[in-house]
Amino acid sequence: MLIPSVLSPSQQGYFYTFNAVLATQIFFELGLNHVLIQLTSHSAAHLRRLSDGHFEGELRWKQAIVSLLTCSRKWNMIMACLFFLVLLAGGTFFFSRNGTLPTAEWLQAWVVLAVAAAFNLAMSSRLAIWEGLGEVGQVARLRLHQSILGYVLLWVMLLSGQGLQAVAAVPLVAALMTAWRLSRQPQFRRLQESVAAEAVSTKGGGLSWRKDIFPLQWRIALSWASGYFIFNFLTPVIFAYQGPAAAGQLGLALTIFSAITTVGISWISAKIPVLSAHIARSERGELNALFDSQALRSVSATTLCVVGFVTVAEVASAFVPKVFERLPSLAILLMLAVVTIVNSIIFALAAYMRAHKEEPLLGQAVVTAILVGVGVYWAAPHGLTAAVAAYAGVTALVALPWSVLIYAKYRQRTI
């Protein structure tokens, strides 16, 4: 509500395109965090956590977690540095060439945003391992606090006339709070130290990056890199072909639908470590029962929220035109609504399959990304509606049926 009320149409376009370009982080994270959650939860399934924070079980499973901590920390530090350099140079070039606002109005915000994003990437692997150890609630609580403080700061900056400088509020608060929590939170230190103290005394063991991590990561990396073209490529292309105002309309709608998606998939994402643990113990009945109930809640909640938003947007546009005229047309909202529901189904199916420490959607993701990229790039010069139609068509007619067919094979497994 505040962004279209406070920012100009061009500033709104920059605001949301900043975030779309920022999503190129996926090319540097390369799916590692998802792999870390899977591998950590599979190892933790063979351990029992004691009341003092230590773990009881075979030494090899403890060594596996220690090796994940060590390798991922180094990897993410290197990737974070590269991400910052590429983001700063590439983003500055893109917005200077395609934008309409003076450089002085957006450059400082872009630099701060790049710094905050790089720090978040550097620390993200430790949060992933924390989740894999079963501390989903602790990580979720941290992210809740980050969101509350980050968005309060965003609102204050917008209302105080800071303009595009406000765009860095949420990631900057997230970076500072994550750094504070990881350095000062006794519980997380105890989780690491208890494993390390018992595991490092014996040499050998652990996981090998080349044998245990990379075979899964490269598939996840290609699949997630394809996800950039599936989920984030649309806004920068519209920015370049249709201008910041059109990109701002699309960005606002996508942000709202993305928030709905986040709410909907929470039922599934919160249970990913539990799904992995059931698979590690060959508990197929428990696995399928848990997935069925969580997937139904996830898709139902997404559908309900999507229908509610489109209805409110259509009705309220007659009473608050200044805000709702910044959204795209009803036809575009309906297409994006369908995409959001379809993606909630695909995400649920993908979580079930990836919990097996496999990436069966690699081919689907690459083909979908190519079709979306080509379709959007071809349609964007013809208007926003044409570009969104190309995006929605590929998602509903190619990505969903393909995912369902692959999932059916996994559902038939007995071990």
Image: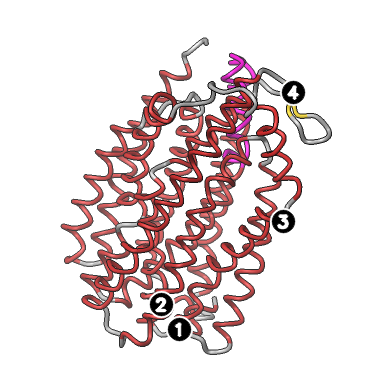
Q: Mark 2: few, some, or many residues within 10 Å (few <14, many ≥20)?
A: many
Residue drawn at x 57%, y 82% is 157
Above or below — where is 115 with respect to 29?
below
Q: Are marks 3 and 2 in contact (CB under 8 Å)?
A: no
Residue shown at 51% from the left, 28% from the top: 355
The answer for how far apart the CA atoms under marks 4 and 3 are is: 25 Å
Q: Position of residue 211 (x, y in %)?
A: 40, 24
User: What amino acid is labelled 4 in the image?
Assistant: Glu
Furthest residue toward top = 414
Residue 158: image quadrant is bottom right
Cβ atoms at labels 1 and 3 below 8 Å apart: no
- Check contact, mark 4 vs mark 3: CB within 8 A: no
Colouring mode (rainbow / by chain / secondary structure / one colour): secondary structure
Residue 230 percent coordinates (x, y):
33, 49
Q: Which residue is mark 4?
A: 56
User: Marks 2 and 4, how far apart in space?
Assistant: 53 Å
Q: Which residues are magenta?
A: 267-288
**Residue indicated by mark 3:** 184
Relative height, residue 25 to residue 356 (above, below): below
Q: For mark 1, give the secondary structure.
A: loop
Specify whether residue 289 is in view: no
- Mark 3 and mark 2 lie on one chain; the one further toward the N terminus is 2
